[in-house]
Image (cartoon, rainbow, N blue to C red):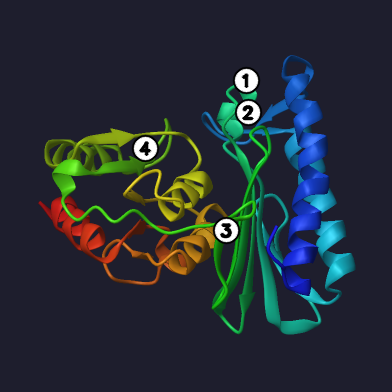
Amino acid sequence: MPQTSALLTVMIAAARKTGRALARDFGEVENLQVSRKGPADFVTAADLKAEKTLFEELSKGRPGYGFLMEERGEVVGSDKTHRWIVDPLDGTLNFMHGLPHFAISIALEREGALVAGVVYDVIKDELFWAEKGAGAYLNDRRLRVAARTELNDAVIATGLPFRGKPGHDKALAELGRVMAATAGVRRFGSAALDLAYVAAGRVDGSWERGLSPWDFAAGAVLVREAGGFAREVDGGDFMQTGAVIAGNERVLRLLGDALKG
């Protein structure tokens, strides 16, 4: 693996330690304790345990940093300039159904800017990592976004709102327009991995609305460091709206045009 900074070493070690436990729990998925926290939105004992491990490991590595976490919410640190943005299990529904497509997502925000990201696909042992100005990597391989420039050649990843969430009609309208303009649309069930796949050139672009910062913060760093762009769909602040679009410069523009109709 290429030389990583001390910061990334902390992030990667936390992700790998947490991943080992998640992999064991995935193997026992039928025995997991499950509680509902909303329509079709499950939280598992494994999810909570993973978040606890990440909180402890990251706090040990960088004492005083704040947190924004899926389950714990905002945890204010003594260091007001740094904040971890963490999803311990992105793709919970996949996990619960025994589908091996989920990830741990860790991003670091410094003075309001995203500066580092790790997305760890536990089952495939694929570690996507990036730091501002240092490039993006999958394990030890440097990443670049795909070079395709026409939507009719492009495969695009997206997410769709589940039962109980707003925006179904808008999502279906946008999906129809993108389906008509592209080679294909994929719905994998993990926004963090969608963005990691954009960074790796596995898909040409992605878009999704209704996300939370922990779903996409690390992935946005990956895309940007792989030579692509990740921004808010309608031009606002994606940290506030949760609407994210990503791709190379031309795909981003064409995909944005297709979404507008």
* Residue underneath mark 2: 95
Front one among 132 and 87: 132
Could you tell me how far apart the alpha carbons at marks 1 and 3 are, in whole angstroms?
27 Å
Relative image position of residue 153 (x, y in whole percent): 19, 42
Question: Of label 4 and label 2, which has the lower sequence position?
Answer: 2
Residue at 51% across / 66% down in the picture?
A: 221
Could you tell me how far apart the alpha carbons at marks 3 and 2 are, in whole angstroms?
25 Å
Whether residue 213 is visible, yes or no, is: no
Relative image position of residue 52 (x, y in whole percent): 83, 50
* Residue underneath mark 1: 98
Whether residue 114 is visible, yes or no, is: yes
Q: Residues within 10 Å of mark 4 (few under 14, many from 20)?
A: some
Relative to 63, say whether 11 is above or below: above
Between circles 1 and 3, the one closer to the viewer is 3
When asked about the image quadrant of residue 80, the answer is bottom right
Q: Is residue 166 left or right of residue 177?
A: right
The numbered dot on residue 160 is 4
Q: Residues within 10 Å of mark 1 (few under 14, many from 20)?
A: some
Q: Are marks 3 and 2 in contact (CB under 8 Å)?
A: no
Dot 3 falls on a residue whose secondary structure is: strand
Residue at 17% across / 57% down in the picture?
A: 254
When asked about the image quadrant of residue 61, the answer is bottom right
Q: In the rendered structure, which amino acid carries the disc numbered 2? A: Phe
Q: In the rendered structure, which amino acid carries the disc numbered 4? A: Leu
